Image: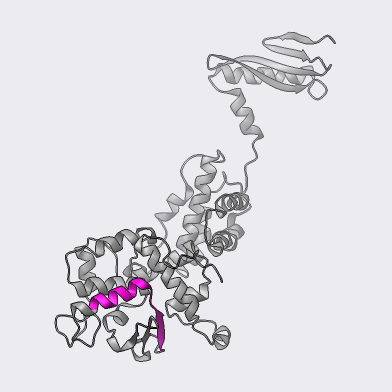
């Protein structure tokens, strides 16, 4: 059999001789009512006996209503380990993350907390018990990190299912039900997702409430300071020409003076607040000129707007936005929140409050909240 053509061996099995002289096995079988040709390999690699055996196996699958081609592909498919799958998911999403630091954190947390536990297991062999074993050591000790790791594990398994590497439920679902309850403090400062910030600001500006409380809450959001620092703000603390608000040490949590750069919108709010009341020493007075707003004012305003969040949570909203949507260094973002540097050595060498870099950050944040883009006209975090 050297002439080009197709030579029947029986039961749908053929030896095909190509014009080039190459010889290969071909099985013709009906799959789900449709004639299908399945290649079984070349004669040099697959003997007649082996071809007949494989053809018989595939015909049985077809007669039982299965798909021989699908089963052969599944048998040949290489199922990745969790570590390999995580790297693939990271690579696929990396370009969509605007903040390189966030992209690095995504894969680094999985590498640190998950890969040592079940990273080398094939992703279709991992169970809820494996996920629980990885999360237990950090769930209460590092609650915020643990929640992010849990979400990232879920994403990897969702990718694996969509890619055909595993079936059934996501093993994270079972873990979520048995993990211990984290500290209640984590729920005290429920935060608004940053993607909803501009919609919230728009609603805030039109809500039926006192002008002083409306302006104060927006001002607090745009400056990312604490509630007491805003409601106790005095007119004497502001320099509108320099667009700077200097909060004295005695009013700061860390008992250290804090300068706040003011965006154009913040200046507008301050001028509008003075029009509402130009007699009080407080920028946002309460019911009487000699007293500031009550520290419950924002809570009542949020309830009126039907938002189940807290005023303090907007600091988290700002921080999440800065981390995930900009390229500003972490030190600049932490300085904007007036957070102390935990590392004593680093703190000893850090002699600046990064004020000018923070100005660009806060102007960018105000632009994002306005829904008009970046007020400064620069890319988030772009360095001069």
Above or below, 29 against 314 in this view is above
Q: Is residue 312 visible?
A: no
- Residue 122, percent from left and from top: 61, 46
Q: Is residue 342 left or right of residue 16?
A: left
Seen as rendered, the residue at the extreme left is: 288
The residue depicted at 52 percent of the width and 76 percent of the height is 331
Above or below, 31 against 198 in this view is above
The residue depicted at 38 percent of the width and 80 percent of the height is 243
Quarter of the image for the N terminus: give it. Answer: top right
Residue 96 or 206: which is nearer the viewer? 206
- Residue 265, percent from left and from top: 34, 71
The residue depicted at 65 percent of the width and 14 percent of the height is 28
Q: Which residues are magenta?
A: 256-273
Tell me where residue 193 sits by quadrant: bottom left
Residue 160 or 332: which is nearer the viewer? 332
Quarter of the image for the C terminus: give it. Answer: bottom right
Count all numbered tags in the image, as a single digit: 0
């Amino acid at each position: 059999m050297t002439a080009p053509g197709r030579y029947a061996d029986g039961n749908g099995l053929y030896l095909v001789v190509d014009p080039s002289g190459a010889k290969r096995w071909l099985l013709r079988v009906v799959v789900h009512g449709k004639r299908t040709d399945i290649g079984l390999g070349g004669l040099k690699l697959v003997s007649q006996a082996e071809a007949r055996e494989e053809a018989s196996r595939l015909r049985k699958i077809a007669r039982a209503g299965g798909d021989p081609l699908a089963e052969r592909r599944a048998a040949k498919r290489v199922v990745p380990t969790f570590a390999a799958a995580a790297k693939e998911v990271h690579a696929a999403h990396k370009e969509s993350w605007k903040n390189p630091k966030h992209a690095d954190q995504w894969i680094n947390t999985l590498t640190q907390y998950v890969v040592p536990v079940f990273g080398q297991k094939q992703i279709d062999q991992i169970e809820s018990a494996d996920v629980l074993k990885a999360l237990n050591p950090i769930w209460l000790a590092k609650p915020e990190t643990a929640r992010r790791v849990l979400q990232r594990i879920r994403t990897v398994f969702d990718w694996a299912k969509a890619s055909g590497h595993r079936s059934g439920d996501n093993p994270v679902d079972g873990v979520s039900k048995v993990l211990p309850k984290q500290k209640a403090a984590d729920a005290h400062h429920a935060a608004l997702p940053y993607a909803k910030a501009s919609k919230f600001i728009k609603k805030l500006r039109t809500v039926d409430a006192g002008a002083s409380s409306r302006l104060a809450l927006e001002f607090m959001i745009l400056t990312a300071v604490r509630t007491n620092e805003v409601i106790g703000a005095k007119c004497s603390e502001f320099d509108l020409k320099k667009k700077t608000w200097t909060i004295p040490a005695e009013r700061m949590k860390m008992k250290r003076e804090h300068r706040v750069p003011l965006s154009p919108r913040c200046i507008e709010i301050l001028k509008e607040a003075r029009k509402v009341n130009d007699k009080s020493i407080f920028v946002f007075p309460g019911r009487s000129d000699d007293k500031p707003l009550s520290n419950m004012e924002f809570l009542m305003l949020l309830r009126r707007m039907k938002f189940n969040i807290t005023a303090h949570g907007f600091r988290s909203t700002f921080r999440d936005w800065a981390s995930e949507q900009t390229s500003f260094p972490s030190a600049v973002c932490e300085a904007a929140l007036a957070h102390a540097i935990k590392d004593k050595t680093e703190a000893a060498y850090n002699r600046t409050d990064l004020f000018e870099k923070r100005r660009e950050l806060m102007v960018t944040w105000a632009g994002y909240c306005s829904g008009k883009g970046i007020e400064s006209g620069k890319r988030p975090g772009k360095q001069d």
